[in-house]
Amino acid sequence: MPLWQELPLLLVVAFCLAVLIRTFLLQAFYIPSASMENTLLIGDRVLVNKIVYDVREPARGEVVVFRGTDNWDPENVPQQQGSFLGRLGRTIGDLIGVSEPGERDFIKRVIALPGDTIACCDAEGRVTVNGYPLDEPYVTDNSSIDIPPTPGECRSRRFGPIVIEMGQMFVMGDHRAVSQDSRCQGPVPIKNVIGRAFVIVWPTSQWAGMPVPKTFEKVPRPLALPGGPAAAREAGPEGVAARGRTVAAEGQPVVPGKFDFFVPFVGVLSHRRVRPTRARSDNVGSVL
């Protein structure tokens, strides 16, 4: 077959493979806001592992992309593209991670998990998880400790203490002075997580992994899961959640896997037939 006849077929196959990878395995996301500076800068692109949380739960300190609940006010409302070419451009942009952000998609750092008690601040103005003060050198331009906390606003550094319920997580941006996060918008359902951001791929000069800060390794386990024995029974004696994913047993901290990078490539071969329900963004190319 001549090359000119093979080329359209190759393009179609390549496009289908890209769509499958984007939908189930990996996706590039564009960063349009300053809420995660200086970890992520405006214009950065990150790769998000969309299958890792099908085999384990999120861990404290990981940067995740998630779908905000109705309580979360969108920080960016994408412009509507009315024409066919406009919609086509948006679709292609979503595919490669350079389009305008979806209004309900966010990227933040996981700070606390079910059973954790989180508060701010200790005597030195630090966030505490289960009484342990976090050392957060990644935080840029922290919120003011002098402003009293106001419901619905994230201007104050002070909040809590808050006990995180089953199936929830508490997330915060690294640029605390501008980030709209769980401090004022509430915890996020773990089922809304789309994936873990694990590497910066653009600009190429800033190519870098996104490891979990060591301070989270020292956070003590919570005393008990929220809800008492009933919640523990729901999780199961071996830490198997009711919805089918493995979680830590009562009080046991979740530890990120050392081989998360390989999960998208080997997970498809050994994946369960019945997949747990998680948020799958239908219009995600960039996050807030």
Image (spheres, rainbow, N blue to C red):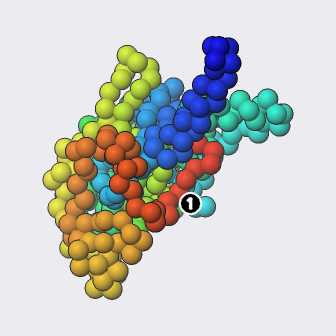
- Considering the image in quadrants, where does the N terminus appear? top right
For the point 44% across and 20% down, the residue is 203
User: In the image, residue 108 lies at what x, y percent?
Assistant: 43, 46
Residue 219 visible to the viewer: yes
224 sits to left or right of 162: left
Q: Nearer the viewer, residue 217 or 20?
A: 20
For the point 18% across and 51% down, the residue is 217
Residue 173 visible to the viewer: no
For the point 35% across and 54% down, the residue is 270
Q: Is residue 177 above or below residue 188?
A: above
User: In the image, residue 172 lies at what x, y percent?
Assistant: 40, 49
110 sits to left or right of 187: left
Circle 1 crowding by C-alpha within 10 Å: few under 14, some 14–19, many from 20: some
- Furthest toward the right, the residue is 83
Q: Is residue 67 above or below residue 63?
A: below
User: In the image, residue 102 lies at what x, y percent?
Assistant: 62, 44
Q: Nearer the viewer, residue 146 or 235?
A: 235
Identify the amino acid type marked 1: Thr
133 sits to left or right of 111: left
Which of the 4 quarters of the picture holds residue 196?
top left
- Furthest toward the top, the residue is 3
Instruction: Identify the secondary structure beneath mark 1.
Output: loop
- Residue where numbered disc 1 is placed: 69
Q: Nearer the viewer, residue 249 or 77?
A: 249
- Furthest toward the bottom, the residue is 230
